Image (spheres, rainbow, N blue to C red):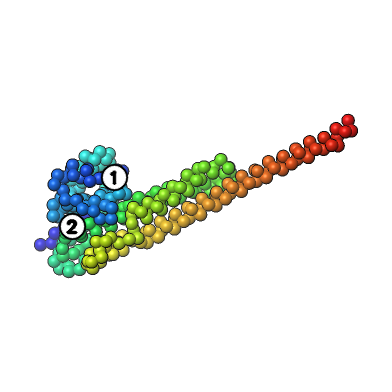
Amino acid sequence: MPEKILFVSIEIPIIINQKDLEKEFPGLILTKIENSIVGEITNDKFIFTTSFGVITFCNFTHDEIKSFLYRLKIKEANDYETALINQDYPMLVDSNFEKPFIDSQIIKYNKFNKSIASIISLVLSQSVGLEIRERSLELKLQDSKKLYDRIEHVKASDRKDLMIFASSIAKERFEILSQLYLLDKPDILWDDFQLESLYNQLALQLELRNRFEVVEYKISFLKESVDFITDRVNQKSSEFLEWIIIGLIVIEILFSTYEYIIKPLL
């Protein structure tokens, strides 16, 4: 009889470590995949925590998820489906599917184990993590627009804020590459063609690569914007210095005129 399993990935404001899981689930079997922790509670129930603030529940009910988030003191626990970035995906374990099949509605395969749960959890976590970054970049784009709106009024004193903004953009890109590891396939896929097919299909269905390219474009645009505005600030700073130099020259000419021309005539 086909078995249905639900995966739910959720954004959380804290990082769950090994001790947190062992305290919550005594006897938990822990392994690692791509710097993330996979906790095997039973042979068909898993929890997957990442280093980038996303947790994935496999075969938990919504009430169990809410209860766990509440014990973590996450204030949005009861309303996580609307208050936190999340994504769910059902899986149907059906003997009719010798190869993994995935569409926009469901994952179908004829077997289920820790490796399969880990790969599905990883891709869903990456998708939620990417959406967190997408929203963060949207806010930065709004900030960039505000800078453009007042570009004629930027001053040399704005340089510090621009450097902070530029650093935040660089940090976004670094964290996407170093934590979401979207560009590298997990080592677990190397010797398992079917598992790799599962990973590739789900990543394609969730458009991870395309979304990453859009994020890259937005980061490049933001960097170009900051560079342009910084150049504008530097130009205004140079113009200000030029006027100071001109002023000093004029003062020097006036003093020289008084000293060598006007004073002797007095």
Q: Quadrant of the N terminus?
A: bottom left
Q: Is residue 7 visible?
A: yes
Q: Residue furthest left?
A: 1
In the image, residue 251 above or below residue 224 = above
| In-image side of 250 versus 39 (left or right) | right
The amino acid type, in three-letter code, at marker 1 is Ile
| In-image side of 185 versus 174 (left or right) | left
| In-image side of 164 versus 191 (left or right) | right
The tag on residue 1 is none
The amino acid type, in three-letter code, at marker 2 is Lys
Expressed as whole percent of the image width and height from the top left, the position of residue 226 reads 51, 50
| Among the two numbered marks 1 and 2 on one chain, the one whose residue lies closer to the N terminus | 1
Q: Quick check: marks 1 and 2 in contact, CB under 8 Å?
A: no
Residue at x 47%, y 44% (from the top left corner): 164
In the structure shown, which secondary structural element does the residue marked by tag 1 occupy?
Answer: loop
Choose between 264 and 173: the one closer to the eye: 264
Which quarter of the figure has residue 13?
top left
In the image, residue 255 above or below residue 101 = above
Choose between 237 and 67: the one closer to the eye: 237
In the structure shown, which secondary structural element does the residue marked by tag 2 occupy?
Answer: helix
Category of crowding for the residue at label 1, using alpha-carbon neighbours closer than 10 angstroms: few (below 14), some (14–19), many (at least 20): few
Q: Is residue 63 visible?
A: no
Per the model, the C-alpha gap separating discs 1 and 2 is 22 Å
Choose between 147 and 226: the one closer to the eye: 226
Residue pointed to by mark 1:
15
Residue at x 31%, y 60% (from the top left corner): 206
Q: Residue furthest right?
A: 265
Q: Quadrant of the C terminus?
A: top right
Residue pointed to by mark 2:
114
In the image, residue 1 above or below residue 243 = below
